[in-house]
Image (spheres, rainbow, N blue to C red):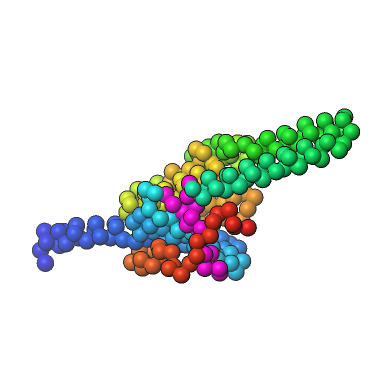
Amino acid sequence: MSWPRLALSILLVLPSLAAADATLHYRAASGEAETVYVAGTQLRLVTEAGGERSTLLFVGADSGTLVLLDEAHETYTELGQASLAALAAQREAQRRAAREALDAALGELPDATGEAIEASARRVLARAGSDEPPRGRLERSGERRRIAGHDCELVTVRVETHTDSRHCLADPTTLDLSSTDVATLLGMLRRAAELAGQRGAALDGIPLESQRPDAGPTLVLERIEHQPLAAELFRIPAHYRARALTDLP
C-alpha cells in the first residue's frame, strides 16, 4: 500500500475510533466500584458497595432526565422537574403539619417557657423550610496529579461554609472520548449537582478521582475502555414498574 493510501485509510478510521462507546472504571481501596457506560447522549452509572448495587440512567443530554433503577424491586424512578416538584410539595405539607403541631404544643406550656421554645423551634423550621438551595462554588488548587496516565487538577466543591467533595478533574479534550460522550458526562454531572441543590458547583471537567470527606471512600479511575455497548444498557426494562420519588424511603 502506498503512503498516500495508508494515510487516507488512517484518517478514515480515526473518526470512528473517536466516536466509539466508552466505559470508565473507578475503584476505591475499600473495594467499592463505580462503572460509567456512555454512548453518545446516553449514560449508565452502576455503583457497587457492600454487596449492594445501584444503577442510574441519564437519558438524553438535552432533556437531562436521571432515572434511578431499583433492580431488587424491579422499579424505576424518574428524577425530573415534575418529581422534584412533587417532593417539594410533600415536604412543605410536612413542614406545615410540624408548625401546626408546634402551635398546639406551645399552647399548653407556661408563657415564658413557651415563648423561648417557640423562638428556637421556629428558627429551626425556617431553615428547614427554605426552598432556596445553598450556593456552591468550585475552588481550584492549581495542584496537578497524574492518574491512569492522564493529567488532572485538584479542585474542591464547597457548599456555603463546608467542604462537600474533592475531585481531580481532567481536561476533557485530553481524554480519548468523543465530544458527544464528553457533553453527556458533563451534562450528567451538572444535572446531579442541580438535583442535590448545589447551585454553581457543577464540575467542568471529567473526574479521575472523587471523594466526599464525610461519606464514602475515594474513587479513583482505573482505566477507560472502548468497545460497543448494547442498547439495552440504556433502556428501562419493559417489566419495571414506575415508582414516584415521594414513595422512596
- The quadrant in which the N terminus is found is bottom left
Q: Residue at x 87, y 33 (%)?
A: 113
Q: Residue at x 44, y 52 (%)?
A: 65
Is 151 placed above or below 160 here?
below
155 sits to left or right of 149 = right
150 sits to left or right of 245 = left
Q: Position of residue 148 (x, y in %)?
A: 45, 58
Is 203 placed above or below 56 here?
above
Q: Is residue 74 magenta?
A: yes
184 sits to left or right of 249 = left
On the image, which quarter does residue 11 sit in? Answer: bottom left
- The quadrant in which the C terminus is found is bottom right
Q: Seen from this angle, which residue lies furthest right? A: 110
Q: Position of residue 46 (x, y in %)?
A: 49, 62
Q: Nearer the viewer, residue 49 or 84?
A: 84
Can residue 56 be seen here?
yes
Can residue 221 be seen here?
no
Q: Position of residue 169 (x, y in %)?
A: 46, 47
On the image, which quarter does residue 40 sit in? Answer: bottom left
On the image, which quarter does residue 121 sit in? Answer: top right
Q: Position of residue 56 (x, y in %)?
A: 48, 59
| Secondary structure predominantly adopted by residues drawn in magenta | strand
Q: Nearer the viewer, residue 36 or 89?
A: 89
Tell me which segment is drawn in magenta.
64-81
Q: Is residue 153 magenta?
A: no
Q: Nearer the viewer, residue 57 or 236?
A: 236
Is 243 placed above or below 119 here?
below
Instruction: Report how many numbered discs are placed on residues in the image.
Output: 0
Q: Residue at x 45, y 58 (%)?
A: 57
